[in-house]
Image: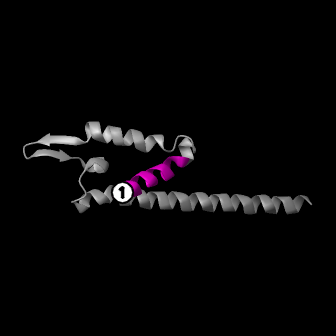
Amino acid sequence: VRDLLGFLSLGVILLHWTGYRYAGIVPTVYVFGAAIFGREAGVAGEQTALWAWPISTSESLLYWLPALLLAFVALVVTTLRSHTASSRIVISQALDTRRE
């Protein structure tokens, strides 16, 4: 559930800049980058970096934080995008009525 929430949120956030065709590529590349660079070898063994939440185990609640943060940002981006789109419609309708 955590990974699904994070990947969908990442896709929604980047949808504005990448478009519908490429919105799924960025989360896929992110997973490969997290798998390659997200493990930190230390004294206590191998640990997962916080930014590499997709490859961590779901035992720790700390790794839910990036996915929840992405979901919040996606909610804000979607709300702002729908607000600006609706205001554009209202402005264009107002301009159309003035022309008539």
Instruction: Specify the principal SS of the magenta part.
Output: helix
Disc 1 secondary structure class: helix
Asked if residue 3 lies in the magenta stretch, the reply is yes
Q: Residue at x 40, y 38 (%)?
A: 29
**Magenta segment boundaries in residue numbering:** 1-15
Label 1 amino acid? Ala
Q: Residue at x 28, y 40 (%)?
A: 35
**Res 45 quadrant in image:** top left
Residue 58 in picture, x, y percent from top left: 25, 57
Q: Is residue 40 shown above or below 66? A: above
Image position of 76 (left or right of 94): left
Q: Among all residues in the image, which is located at the extreme top?
A: 36
Residue 13 in picture, x, y percent from top left: 49, 51
Q: Nearer the viewer, residue 8 or 87?
A: 8
Image position of 67 (left or right of 43): right
Q: Nearer the viewer, residue 99 or 24?
A: 24
Residue 47 in picture, x, y percent from top left: 17, 47
Image position of 85 (left or right of 6): right
Q: Which residue is mark 1?
A: 67
Residue 56 in picture, x, y percent from top left: 25, 50
Q: Residue at x 45, y 55 (%)?
A: 9
**Res 60 quadrant in image:** bottom left
